[in-house]
């Protein structure tokens, strides 16, 4: 389960300093993720450590989503891309993200900058079906303790739809900034 919010560049820098002092840095990573068209939320990703295929059940900004993930050697990414193209899938969106992942108490805390999309904080914790509501409330309190307002699903959906329509020009604009 996860909770996320858009943050400003200033908040991002403040939180990065906070987590560096108060949490354990698990990894710093650069990720390229391709979302494919189709009935399922199907993606491939290449990061600094490996490549993977993964699928998420449910809708894009749901609080609870089951994930299926298969990891590959980092160098296999182009083969994965070719496989999905051969199966008739098309890339719907490409994301280019710099991520810092911390272990903050019992929570995974990620700070992201995604080219053309912005700065985001994400708090995540694995939970059983029985505890998911309680754990979601705990994540909300943790986010609020950082003085971050929760971004509504509607705002995430709106920003996602805008990025989906304009991602090619948005990432190009940042290359010229």
Image: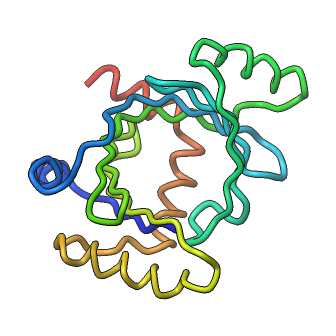
Task: Name the residue at 71% across, 31% down.
Answer: 91
Q: Is residue 80 left or right of residue 6?
A: right
Q: Nearer the viewer, residue 34 or 126?
A: 126
Against 61, is 172 above or below? above
- The C terminus sits in image quarter: top left
Residue 141, image x, y percentages: 29, 81
Task: Name the residue at 48% across, 27% down.
Answer: 47
Q: Residue furthest right?
A: 87
Tell me the colour scheme of the image: rainbow
Q: Nearer the viewer, residue 35 or 47?
A: 47
How many tags in the picture?
Answer: 0
Against 36, is 59 above or below? below
Where is residue 138, by image quadrant?
A: bottom left
Residue 159, image x, y percentages: 47, 57
Residue 37, image x, y percentages: 77, 41
Q: Is residue 82 left or right of residue 31?
A: right
Where is residue 125, by image quadrant?
A: bottom left
Task: Name the residue at 19% across, 76% down.
Answer: 145
Q: Nearer the viewer, residue 79 or 69?
A: 69
Task: Name the residue at 83% across, 45% down.
Answer: 38
Residue 133, image x, y percentages: 52, 86
């Amino acid at each position: 389960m996860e909770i996320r919010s858009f943050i400003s560049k200033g908040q991002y820098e403040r939180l990065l300093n906070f987590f560096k002092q108060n949490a354990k840095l698990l990894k710093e990573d650069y990720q390229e993720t391709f979302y494919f068209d189709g009935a399922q939320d199907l993606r491939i990703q290449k990061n600094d450590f490996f490549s993977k295929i993964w699928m998420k059940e449910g809708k894009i900004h749901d609080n609870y989503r089951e994930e299926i993930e298969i990891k590959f050697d980092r160098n296999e990414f182009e083969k994965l891309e070719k496989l999905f193209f051969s199966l008739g899938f098309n890339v719907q969106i490409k994301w280019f993200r710099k991520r810092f992942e911390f272990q903050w108490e019992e929570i995974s805390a990620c700070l992201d900058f995604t080219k053309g999309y912005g700065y985001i904080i994400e708090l995540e914790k694995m939970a059983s079906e029985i505890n998911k509501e309680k754990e979601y409330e705990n994540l909300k309190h943790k986010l609020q303790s950082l003085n971050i307002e929760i971004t509504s699903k509607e705002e995430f959906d709106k920003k996602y739809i805008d990025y989906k329509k304009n991602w090619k020009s948005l990432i190009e604009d940042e290359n010229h900034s």
